[in-house]
Amino acid sequence: MVKISKERKLGAIIVILIIIFSTALISIFVYFEIQYHIIQDNYDELKNNYNSLNGDYNSLTDQYNDLVEDYNTLSQTFQQYSRLSIDSLMMLTYNEIREQYQPNYNPWLGSYYYDTLSVEYGANVCAHDLARLYWPSVEDDYYDSRGTHLSSDAYDMITYAIDFIGISKYDSNTDRIEKILDFIYNNIEYSEDINDEFLFPVEVLTYRSGDCDDFSILASTLFEYVGIESAIGFFTNESKDNDHCMVLVNLPDLDNYGYWYYDDLTNQEVSTGRWIIIEPQATIDMQYEDNLIAKWRMIAIAEIPN
């Protein structure tokens, strides 16, 4: 039997211990390697989730900002509608004025007389909401109920409309006309009038609609408020089977914009100077279009009273 020396036994034991320790180290390394990959996979998954959530957050932030912007727009629109709306007392008083003072067609007097009276009444309607005149027989009851004059309340609404439009004292007359026409074009819709009634300017602002004479009354009032001398004009086509209403402004030109005009209307008992025709249903850059104004011939005109 071979006798193993103590040195060899010790060496063998050391080798075995090294093998066991190495095996343990390899196992531990493999374990931690596996755990590292698991943690790395978890990290990658969490990172992807974070990026996804961050994208959702950014998307929700954009949606929130859009909602805030929409809210501010709606709030501004609501404030505009609230400030530019008449109440029932104003509506009833305007109806009473129309019933008593708006001319009715009389076949015995003819269309010329009716057109002349009507265009003068339309000019007075503008002057009323500019607080330049009022009808005491109707409006005294309004004053007794509210303690203010209807014309003054209407003037306040016109003032707010001008502020909303954003007209500056530094604007030229052309700039002012452009801004007013843009406001009307974007906020007032055309609506047929079955009774041929003239709406007052603040009624047009309230209803956000009207026919050609209502558009003209509103535009003339706003022009007059900002210092542009204006008039209401009745027109007809060449065959005289279709009538229309537009505005005229007493200005030398519209700067770089094209326009149609009368150089002298003193025979119509209006002020001297060039009277430029304005179609209030169109923006300023559309005023020179052939099919818009050229086909009409004026039959009556009245300046807005001072």
Image: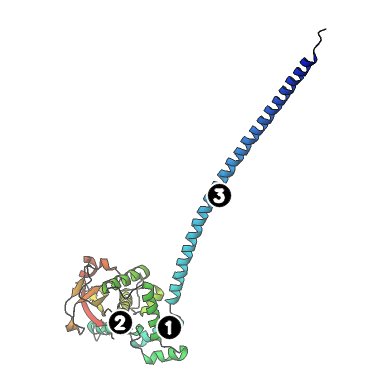
Residue topped by disc 3: 53
Residue at image coords 72%, 26%: 21
Q: Amino acid at mark 3?
A: Leu
Q: Position of residue 39 (x, y in %)?
A: 63, 39
Q: Is residue 260 visible?
A: yes
Mark drawn on residue 271: none
Q: Quadrant of the C terminus?
A: bottom left
Q: Marks 3 and 1, how far apart in space?
A: 56 Å
As helix, strand or loop, the secondary structure at mark 3 comes to helix
Nearer the N terminus, badge 2 or badge 3?
Answer: 3
Hey, what amino acid is under mark 2? Answer: Gly
Q: Which mark is residue 90?
A: 1
Q: Give the percent coordinates (x, y) of residue 108.
A: 24, 86
**Which label is found at residue 122?**
2
Q: Nearer the viewer, residue 69 or 41?
A: 41
Q: Quadrant of residue 152?
A: bottom left
- Structural distance between the alpha carbons of marks 2 and 1: 18 Å
Residue placed most toward the observer, 20 or 36:
20
- Front of the two marks 2 and 3: 3
10 Å neighbourhood of mark 3: few (<14), some, or many (≥20)?
few
* Quadrant of the drawing holding the N terminus: top right
- For label 1, the crowd category at 10 Å Cα-Cα, with few meaning under 14, some 14 to 19 and many 20 or more, is some
Q: Secondary structure at mark 1?
A: helix
Q: Secondary structure at mark 2?
A: helix
* Rendering coords of residue 241 (x, y %): 23, 73
